[in-house]
Image (tube, rainbow, N blue to C red):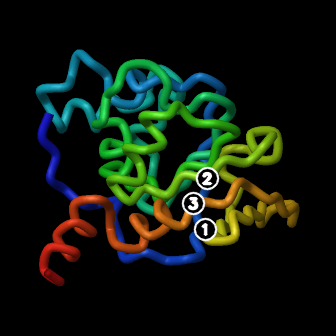
Amino acid sequence: MAIVGTKGIKEYKDILKGNVWVFPDNVDTDAISPGQYLDDVKATLNHTCETLIKEFPNQVKNGDIIVAGRNFGCGSSRETAPIILQEKGIAAVVAESFARIFYRSSFARALPVIEVECISKEFETGDEIEINIPNAEITNLKTGKKLKGKKIHPILLNLLKNGGLEKQLLAELKQK
C-alpha cells in the first residue's frame, strides 16, 4: 500500500491538545490497517479500527488523540498502521506501552507516541487532553489530572521536529 498523503503530518508543536479516543490493551496492526483492504487506501481508511470502536472511522476528527492500554500496535510488522492513523487525522498516541515496530515506525513518520503508566484508566472517550511532548507531560483537561510519561529520546524527538525520517535525511543531504 502506497500512501503519500500528509493529513496527520503538521508542523511540529511541543504542545498538542485534542479530543481523546480510548482504546484497549493489545490493539494490533490488523485492526488499525485491516489486511483485507491493504490494496485499497480509501477502504482501509473507511475501516480502520472499526473492529475496536465501530464509530471510529466515521467520527474521528483531525487533531484527535488516541489514549490506549498496553502493547499498542502489536501484531504484524505493518508499517502502514501509523500512516493510516495520521491519514485519519490522529495527532498523537499515548499508551501504557507500544509494540516495538509500531513505536519506531511512528517516529519515522513523525507521529508522536508517548508511554505513560496507567494512562488508559485516566481518560474516557471524548475527554480533552493536553500533551507536552518534550516533557512527556499529559493533562486530562476535564479532570485536571496531570501524568508524567517516559521522555522521548532526543534522537527520536529530533525526528518528530524534522517531520520524520525521510524529511530529516533529505535535509541532512542538502547540508552536505
Report the residue marked by disc 3: 153
- Ranked by sequence position, the earlier of labels 2 and 3 is 2
Q: Which numbered dot is residue 114?
A: 2
Task: Judge left or right: residue 173 versus residue 137.
Answer: left
Task: Judge left or right: residue 99 versus residue 108.
Answer: right
Question: Looking at this view, is 26 or 48 the one in front?
Answer: 26
Closest to the camera, between mark 1 and mark 3, is 3
What is the three-letter code of the residue carrying label 1?
Ile
Question: Looking at this view, is 9 or 75 the one in front?
Answer: 75
Q: Quadrant of the C terminus?
A: bottom left
Q: Position of residue 14 (x, y in %)?
A: 56, 77
Report the residue marked by disc 1: 133
Q: Are marks 2 and 3 in contact (CB under 8 Å)?
A: no
Task: Judge left or right: residue 148 versus residue 98.
Answer: right
What is the three-letter code of the residue carrying label 3?
His
Crowd around label 3: few <14 · some 14–19 · many ≥20 (10 Å) = few
